[in-house]
Structure formats: C-alpha cells, structure tokens
Image (cartoon, coloured by chain):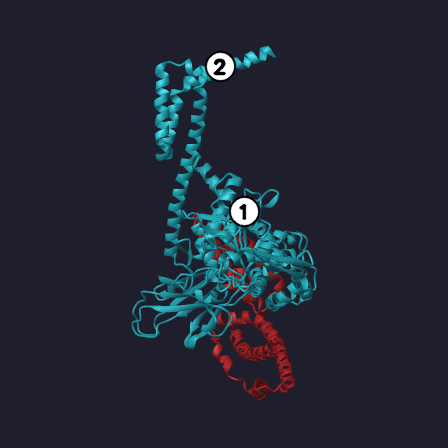
Amino acid sequence: MSFPLIEHTCWRCGQSSEQESEAASLFCKFCNSLQRPVVDYFEFFGFDKSLTIDSAELQRRYYLLSRQLHPDRYTRATETERNFSLEATSILNDGYRVLRDPVQRAEYILKESGFDIGEQRSKDVPPELLEEVFDLNVALDVLRSGDAGALTELEASRERFVEMQNEIDADLELKFRQYDAAPEPERHELLTSIRSVLNRRRYIRNLLQEVNKEFATREA
Amino acid sequence: MSTFQIDFSAVAKKRIVGIDLGTTNSLIAFMDLTGPEVIPTPEGSALVPSVVSVADDGNYVVGDKAQQLLIDRPERTVYSVKRLMGRGIEDVRDELRLFPFRVADGSENVIRLELGGKLLTPPEISAQVLKQLKSQAEAYLSEEVSQAVITVPAYFNDAQRQATKDAGRIAGLEVLRLVNEPTAAALAYGLDKRKDGVVAVYDFGGGTFDISILRLKEGIFEVLSTNGDTHLGGDDIDNKLLAIALEDVESEWGEDVSHSGEAVQTLRRTVINAKEKLSFVPSAAIEFSWRGKVYQREIPRELFESLIKDIVERTLLPCRHAMLDAGLKAEQIDEVVLVGGSTRIPLVRQAVEALFKAKPHTELNPDEVVALGAAVQAAILSGDVTDKLLLDVTPLSLGIETMGGVVSKLIHRNSTIPASATEVFTTSVDGQRNVLIHVVQGERELVRDCRSLARFDLKDLQPVPAGMARVEVRFLIDANGILNVSARDMRSGKEQSVEVKPSYGLTDGQVEAMITESFERAEEDFAARQTREAQVEADTMLLALDKAQASDAWHALSDVERGAIGTARTNLLTVYHTGTHLQIREAIEKLDGVSRRLAENMMNTAVRAALKGSIID
C-alpha cells in the first residue's frame, strides 16, 4: 500500500517536508524535535492495515519506540515536547495492547471500517449454541443451589466451550489471512463475516469467564 | 548571552534525588559515577524513622528524635502516617483502634489529625519527613535539592499517589516521577545486566504489601502485572504481638494499660525488638517495665510463626493473582527479589520460596534497595542513565459510573502506563448545560464496591436538544499512575472545561495554601538561621576583642581609637539580641573597621613573639 505524499511542518523549526505518512514524522528531520503523534495504531507502528501481524516484530518496534518516546526521556524537554511524549506513549501503549491481541486487533479494524461492535450483541444467544448454553445454565443453577454433583457436568461443559473457542480461533486465523490477501472490493464482505464470528467468540468467552469464576470461588 | 548559557547549563545539570517515603522508615539516595548511594543522616544512619512530633513551640521534630518522643510525648507524635495517605476516616476506622491517633471531625475525605494543637493532614505530616530528607541531602551534597523521584507502593490508588505528590509539593520538592517500590527494587538489583528473563519482586514493608512481575529485556523493565494490599505490613505483625502482650499485662497486673499512650508505645518498642530478634534467634523476650511493675515473656519462634501465619498467607493470594494476570506459572519465573524489612522473617522467606519454587535474592539490604532504585530512576530522568527504561502498569482498573450504578471499565488493570481511553458523552435533557462523570477505581462490577476517584463536571455546554451534544472525554493515566481528564466539544472542536472534584484528598487550592504556609514558615526558619549565624560571628569577634584588650597592642592605641572601638562594641551588643542578621552584620563590620589597627598591632606583636621564639630556639 502506498500513501500520497503529505506535507508536514515542524511545530518548532517551521521547516516543511514531504513524507509518505504522518507516522514517518515522529521526529522533525531538521531539528529532531518530537512532533504531534498520529492516532492510528497501524500507522503509528508503521504496519499496513492487516489482520495478521508478526508478533516478534511488533514487540521489537514497541520497545524501540518506547525508548524514543517515553516521558522519562523528556523530563527536561520543553512543555510541548513533554506533552507530545505523554500523548505518543499513551497511543503507543494503547496500540500495543490492541495490536498484539488478534481479537482486539480485528475489532479495531472493524471499528475503523465503520462497523458497530457494541457489547450489547453478546447477549443474544447464537442459535446454534442454544442447547449447549441451556445445559450449562442448568448445571450452574444446580451447583449454586448447593449440589456439587453438577461439577462434573460443568467441567465437561467447560471443555466443550474451550474446544469451540479453539475452533473459532483457527477459523478466525484463516479469515484474517483471507482478508489480508483479498482485493479491496471483497474486504467489506469478509469483515462482515469476521464480525459475526467475533460476536460468537465473545459470547463463548463470557460464558467461560462465568464458569471459571464459579470454579475459582469453589477453590477459594 | 554567555551568562544565559551558563545559567541554562546549571539548571540542566540540577541533581535529582531518589526518595523512599516508607511507612516505618524513609531514605534518600542519589546516583553518581560509582552507582546509587544512600545519603546518611548526620548521625550516620541510612534510615530516618517516618515519625513526626510537634514541639511546644510549634516546630516539628522528625526521625530518631521523634522516635524517642513517641514514648515521652505520644500525644504530640505520629508514626506510620503513610497508612492514612489518600484515605478517609471510613477506610481506617478499624486500624485506628490500634493506632493512638486523634482524628478531628470533618475527616471524611481527608483525615485530619490533632497533634500538639495543630490539625494536620497526612500529606502535611509526610512533608515534614521529606523536608528532613531534603535538608539532609542538601547538607551532604552541599547544593540545593529541589527535584525528586518518590516511591509509592505499586498497589497505591490514584488518591494515595496524589497525596504523596502533594506531600512533595508542600515540602518544596518538585516530584518528577512517582515510581512503584517493587519496580524501583528491580532497577536497583540491576538484574538486567545478567540476562533477560522474568522477575518477581515480593515487597513486604512496614505497612504495605506489593507483588510485581516484570519481564527484563535489553535494559527494558516491563511490568507484566502487579497486585498487593496497601494495608498489610510489619505493623500488622507488631499489632498481633502487642495484642498478646497487652492481654498478658492486663491479666497479670489486673490493669489495662492500653489507654496510656506512653505504656503502649513502650510496649510496642519492645515487641518490635523481639520481632526483629526472632529473625535471627530461635526465641526472644518481650520485656516491659512500667511504674515499678515488670512484665516479661519469652516468645519462641514457633509461637511467633503460628501468630503471623495468616498474615504471611494473606500475601500469597495477591502473588497468585499477579501470576494469573501475567499469564505465567511459577516455573516460568526466573528470579525472585525480596524487598522490605518484613522479608527478613524466615517464615516469609520460606513461603516465598515454596510459592515461586526459586531461591529469592537477598543480596541487597531490603531496607535500602527501594531508595537505591529510586536514585537509578532519578538518573534515568536526568539523562545520566540511558540504557534502562521502566514500563510500569496501573494496578487498578479505571471505570465510569453508568445507569443503575454499574461500572463501565475504560482502562483495565495492568495496562502499561501512560494509558488512555476516550468516551463520547451526550446530554439527556434539552438545553442541558453540564454533564457529571463519576470515575471509580477497582475491579468490581458495581460502583458501590469500587473506590470513588473523582467527579468530573463538564461545564458550560452549548444548550442543544437532548442527545445532540457530543463531548469527547479523554481519560489518561500518566507515567505516575495519576488520572488526567480532558474534554473536547466535537461539534465546535473546542476544548471543554472540566472541573475536578476529588473524592478523597486535597484540592489544588488546599495544597497551594499549605505550600504558602510552609513557605512562610521556611522564610521564618531561614531568617532565624541567618540571625543565629550572625550572632555566632559576633561571639567570635567579641571574644577576640576581650582577649586583645588585655594585650600590649590595646595599650598602644590612642584614646580616640579605644573610644571608637568601645562605641562600636556597645552598638554590636545592642543589636545582638534584637536586631536582624543584617543589622548584626553591619555592627560587626563597623567594629571590624575601627579595630583594624588593633588587629595589625596584635599581628605585629605575634610576629615579633614568633621571631623571638625562633631566635631563642
């Protein structure tokens, strides 16, 4: 992907330069002072907008940028640079959190592409899971009413959901690769299907959290 | 121009010190070419007890001297005030039963202690400890110290951090960074030099417990997770022993001494001594004599360990949570570091070793390691150390109150800081002019189970129909772990004003007032010191003059000369007690001027005497 050249003017020395992206201008090439950071995570890290990311490379860039941008490095700089450093490092940290997690990364792209990814969707039970979810809820209720006999059933239920989650993750990985390889016009459709998988995954994750919490309180 | 440059470089080179503001003891350290170093007190000790006493004249006594006053004048002396930082009366009601502090009315949001006729907040008391450390460093380094890194427990919340920063400001220190204590300890150990890996820091101090898990890679100290309890420490162990001793005393003597501050503090001292001994010997005695009666009890280590077992146990749950949050098992942790005086206890060491399945590091003095790490962080900030960088996390999730008192989480715990979140708010009524946002910290789902942090009032909104307003609010936790909030009207693009109402702690205005007060006080102190110095100089001068008046040189002067000296001497004596330091100095100079010939005569006499002496030899 190539960007049209953008003209950037340094806030301190006032000199302008043309560059491929805003992200290329963390520092002014003339006076080396820190510039106002870009807010897009992919641009910030210098990655193409893709659903698959080399995690080792992501970590390498994260450490490198941390060394350059962290507020610890700007204690004695001007107020403007101190503010830019704080701003840039928070984008860096927020972005690292999102990009290193495949699900959050996909949700970020969905949001940036105009999809609604609100949490409320997680409450609707995906129809194909109805039976499983019903059994699970019964087991949970029995357990909470004091019958430890439901534990084995719950454990079996948990295993099935973990398995489902693993399947979904494999499916997602495949879809991510398809998206990255697909030409622009097909991408929207792929994102739509990714969104529905993500909603299913979120639903299962919430279920699992509830079950795990139940197990954790029992152990404690 | 050249003057400007010289001044500029002088400012840039200003030294930054590292301070460990502890529950029991505080330390100050700095870094030079040979590494971090703790600055000793004039008496040669590294530790300054975090004890503050108010003297009869309203001045403060801090440290070792105040420690003694804890027994002699318990009603004017306070210790472990760190436990009260950033807290309200409801938070500490339980422990106040064991601490002899008198809390004044109106302590809901900030605790106010009655101390020697003053009402003091925890930041003001801590500021006295900081001032002591500051002047100790200034005397040692022979330069002004005005910038510092101060350490805080990793599990401190926003209000506790803010209170620590306020204490620094009141003490006249610019707090450039708050660093988490376990992270500072990891820096001090310099484990990054050995190899990359995962380190757990177990920090069990006087009043707080922290666990942090870090990944070390090429000089970057990345905190993966942190957990802890800001109300668990050596104090709690002391209180267990104290409770037993008080009970014994009551049954043996038939007298409850727990209402006498003096008795309790004396007993507390001996209990602490016994506790400290028990780390090295199998049995230690609690010995307490009071008003002619004597109580003595031998505490074998087994009994001690059974007493503190549940306290040690309480530190292990946060450790397990921290490992869970870091996504690591005990086997994946390469090194364990012990910090804080309470880690000298053998039972604590055993528990840590068993949990992490690794022999913990204890090479550095657990009392000093945090201060040393703070000094390293200070050197990172000053630019003297460039190969290390700390990436710390926020210990608690941050959220806002939504419908039905439910918390909507914006920034999750263990997020690397600085971290941010953006939310868009709107209005629910036509023409609504402001929106109130309630921010809380904690892990629970309901607002009432979390800790209220502050209410942010978005003011002076443009009056528009309900739901039409669009205000983008940015919540940013800075590198100190403190929340900053800014807002922007998305329609106009203009910055939106936000009024902050902190739920706990002092407002900015209150801190400003305290700074002003302490500054005035500092001016008074400074003037008193200058006067004293001038008086000392006058003493030297008058003594020399008295001696001279008995010498031949005095008699060699003319009457006029002797008269002038007499007048100048009387003048000096007049201003000695009542004048300012400037007036005293002026009088000294006058006397010096008129007695110059006397001094010369004396000198000549001395030289002659010396010459004579050398000839005789």
Dot 1 lies on which element? loop
| Distance CA(mark 1)–CA(mark 2) | 58 Å
The quadrant in which residue A127 appears is bottom right
Mark 1 or 2, nearer chain start: 1
Chain displayed in cyan: B
Query: In this figure, which residue is indicated by the disc labeled 1?
Result: B383
Chain (red): A
Question: Which amino acid type corresponds to the residue marked 1 in the rendered image?
Answer: Gly
Quick check: B131 above or below A111? above
Q: Is residue B390 above or below residue B243?
A: above
User: Where residue A82 appears, x then y in whole percent?
Assistant: 46, 52
Q: How many marks?
A: 2
Q: Secondary structure at mark 2?
A: helix
Residue positioned 47% across, 45% down in the render: B146
In depth, the one of A161 and A25 nearer the eye is A161
- Disc 1 residue crowd, few under 14, some 14–19, many 20+, Cα 10 Å: some
Please state, as top left, top right, bottom left or bottom right, where the C terminus of chain A lies in the image: bottom right
Q: Estimate how packed mark 2 is, as few (under 14), some (14 to 19) or many (20 or more) residues with alpha carbons within 10 Å.
A: some
Q: Position of residue B303 (x, y in %)?
A: 66, 65
